[in-house]
Image (cartoon, helix red, strand yellow):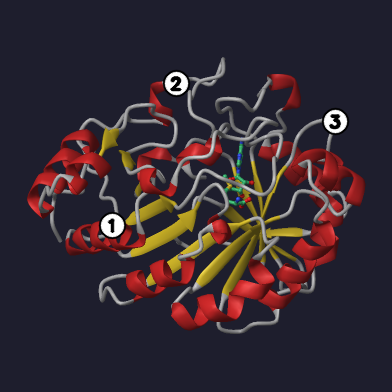
């Protein structure tokens, strides 16, 4: 294994998350401003060929897992081509995608054929009204249809992501657990994190411990002591196939074992979700930079990755970019 992807704290980075577009067909309040993002011309985004080239160079250095995200990755017209190209890279063992599910149903069979191995689908509410309030779009029934289609498709691993906000949807956690209790999936509650344009406030923040308590008033949670590379702390609902995971990005920092690196849709390399420092790879790539030049730009940035949370303490809004422009 190459040491190029090891940072100053000895963390090796084998997991690459790629934002395919900052654009999204939803406007989730916790994620992006209501007006959305200024549309970027496609020439400002990494092309399918460029993405595949960068992944193959990073795979040579030890990346084995890729997640496609955004924005909304299903808006990319060349999504199948991207998945297929990454799927042909021998070292890549897992290709996941995070999606709001709205367009997933029609795309899922072709994506699986192309090599997609897992899908995380966001679902923050089972109430049409609350869903609309959060996503600022009507789409609950389509999203649920996609989730059920994916759950019935044995070729793909499915997880559900929920972000809870106080006064909006935090009391729905047990309802979501009940809804999925008989499914072979993991329902993950992600703590609401601060990003540019998402009006994060402590008063809206719901710690995982509180959500866990709320769920355990109605369900018996059994801790799963499995070692896995996920950031979620998993539990099983007694006598049910469902796993419930808590991603405590704020209250339980898991940065010491971070293995994630990121590419933004406009070709910037980021070593940390919360660190605004980034390195442009798109421009040098288009000027003809070769593998060594690109890796050298990227690794000099990775070497100074902060120990945790981009060096922030979350007492104020911290990250300049919105989640959708970085890629969640
Ligand atoms: C940025 S979205 C992009 C992919 C896709 N559009 C989706 O909705 O899943 C990726 C994940 O980040 C989560 N997310 C976005 N903003 C967040 C925030 N402020 N705090 C916690 N999770 C957030 C979403 O719930 C989603 O599961």
Q: Where 311 falls versus 166 (above or below)?
A: above
The answer to whether any part of residue 307 appears in the image is yes
Instruction: State yes or no: Cβ of the residue under disc 1 lies below 8 Å from any atom of ligand 1.
Output: no
Residue 39: horizontal and vertical position, in percent?
A: 53, 39
Q: Where 154 falls versus 29 (above or below)?
A: below
Mark found first going from the N terminus, 3 or 2: 3
Q: Which residue in the protein does label 2 denote? A: 312
Residue 175: horizontal and vertical position, in percent?
A: 87, 55
Ligand 1's image quarter is top right
Q: Nearer the viewer, residue 162 or 150?
A: 150
Q: Which residue in the protein does label 3 denote? A: 167
Residue 63: horizontal and vertical position, in percent?
A: 27, 60
Quote the CA–CA distance across marks 1 and 3. 43 Å
Quote the CA–CA distance across marks 1 and 2. 32 Å
Mark found first going from the N terminus, 1 or 2: 1
* Residue at x 66% of width, y 74% of height: 106
Q: Where 172 falls versus 80 (above or below)?
A: above
Mark 1 surroundings within 10 Å by alpha-carbon count, few (fewer than 14), some (14 through 19), many (20 or more):
some
**Any mark on residue 50, and which?**
1
The answer to whether any part of residue 229 appears in the image is no
Mark 2 surroundings within 10 Å by alpha-carbon count, few (fewer than 14), some (14 through 19), many (20 or more):
some
Q: Quadrant of the N terminus?
A: bottom left
* Secondary structure beneath label 1: helix
* Residue at x 58% of width, y 40% of height: 248
* Secondary structure beneath label 2: loop
Mark found first going from the N terminus, 1 or 3: 1
* Residue at x 35% of width, y 61% of height: 48
Closer to the eye: label 1 or 3: 1
Q: Is residue 243 left or right of residue 181?
A: left
Instruction: State yes or no: Cβ of the residue under disc 3 lies below 8 Å from any atom of ligand 1.
Output: no
Pointer 1 with pointer 2, Cβ within 8 A: no
């Amino acid at each position: 294994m190459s040491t190029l992807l090891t940072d100053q704290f000895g963390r090796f980075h084998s997991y690459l998350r790629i934002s395919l577009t900052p654009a999204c067909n939803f406007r989730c309040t916790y994620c992006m401003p209501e007006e959305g993002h200024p549309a970027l011309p496609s020439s400002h985004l990494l092309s399918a060929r460029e993405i595949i080239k960068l992944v193959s160079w990073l795979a040579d250095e030890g990346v084995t897992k890729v997640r496609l995200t955004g924005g909304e990755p299903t808006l990319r017209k060349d999504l199948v081509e991207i998945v297929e190209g990454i799927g042909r890279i021998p070292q890549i063992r897992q290709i996941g995608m995070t999606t709001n599910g709205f367009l997933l149903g029609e795309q899922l069979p072709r994506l699986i054929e192309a090599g997609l191995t897992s899908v995380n689908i966001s679902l923050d509410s089972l109430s049409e009204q609350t869903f609309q309030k959060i996503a600022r779009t009507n789409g609950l029934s389509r999203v649920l249809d996609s989730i059920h289609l994916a759950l019935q498709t044995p070729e793909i691993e499915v997880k559900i992501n929920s972000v809870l906000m106080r006064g909006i949807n935090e009391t729905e956690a047990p309802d979501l657990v009940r809804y999925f209790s008989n499914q072979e999936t993991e329902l993950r509650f992600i703590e609401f994190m601060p990003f540019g344009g998402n009006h994060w406030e402590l008063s809206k923040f719901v710690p995982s411990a509180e959500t866990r308590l709320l769920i355990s008033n109605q369900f018996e949670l059994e801790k799963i002591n499995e070692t896995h590379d996920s950031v979620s702390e998993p539990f099983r609902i007694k006598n049910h196939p469902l796993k419930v995971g808590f991603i405590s990005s704020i209250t339980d920092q898991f940065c010491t074992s971070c293995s994630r690196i990121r590419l933004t849709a406009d070709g910037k390399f980021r070593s940390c979700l919360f660190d605004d420092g980034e390195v442009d790879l798109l421009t040098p790539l288009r000027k003809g930079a070769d593998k060594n030049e690109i890796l050298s730009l990227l690794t000099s940035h990775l070497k100074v990755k902060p120990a945790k949370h981009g060096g922030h303490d979350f007492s104020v809004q911290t990250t300049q970019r919105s989640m959708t422009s970085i890629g969640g």
